[in-house]
Image (spheres, rainbow, N blue to C red):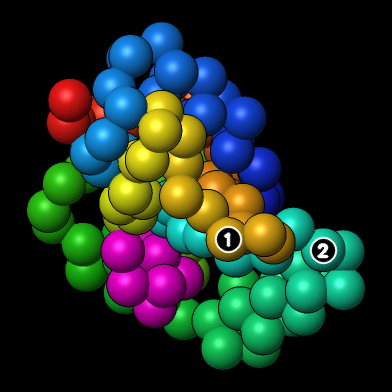
Amino acid sequence: GLTVTDITDEVRDAVRESGIQAGICCVYSPHTTCSVRINEWERGFLEDFAVMLKRLVPTEHYYAHDDWDRRTENICPEDMDFGNGHSHCMAMLLGTAGESVPVRDGELCLGTWQRVFYAEFDGQRRKRVVVKAMGM
Ligand code: ZN
């Protein structure tokens, strides 16, 4: 269920369409099992990242979130079909649902190797990302 997508080009397009020349672009995931992060898009690193996450948060582990004999809150039929306790833990571990990138001369101020990633940890549901560019 771990999927990482490079959304840099879509975010760049949104900033260009906004017409903002100087300001900030917020890229945000309104989901509890996803994160927006910035890093290098390189196969070796992506493999290392997946291995690290699966080592820290193994799928085949007990998660109280998936224990329907105990869980009484936020009852969700999809969670009953496919437990995603590990997905929430991965998202929390990464620490943020979104990133803010400065905009200068109408472009994202990303470093040479930086790309905007959309990381999904349960991969089973339709997801969306919110991009908000502010400035002048
Ligand atoms: Zn859940």
- On screen, 12 above or below 97? above
Farthest right residue in view: 44
**Mark 2: which secondary structure?**
loop
Horizontal side of 9 relative to 129 (left or right) equals right
Specify the amino acid type for callout 2.
Answer: Glu
* Residue 69 visible from this viewpoint: no
CB of mark 2 near ligand 1 (< 8 Å): no
In magenta, the rendered stretch is: 88-96
Rendered image: mark on residue 111: 1
Residue drawn at the location 87% of the way across and 64% of the way down: 43
Q: Residue furthest left?
A: 73
Q: Secondary structure at mark 1?
A: loop
Please tell me how crowded label 1 is: few (under 14), some (14-19), or many (20+) other residues with Cα within 10 Å: few
Nearest to the observer: residue 65 or residue 46: 46
Mark on residue 42?
A: 2
Q: Could you tell whether 122 is left or right of 84 in the image?
A: right
Residue 92 visible in the shown view = yes
What amino acid type should be assigned to the residue bearing mark 1?
Answer: Gly
- What residue is drawn where x is 78% and y is 74%? 45
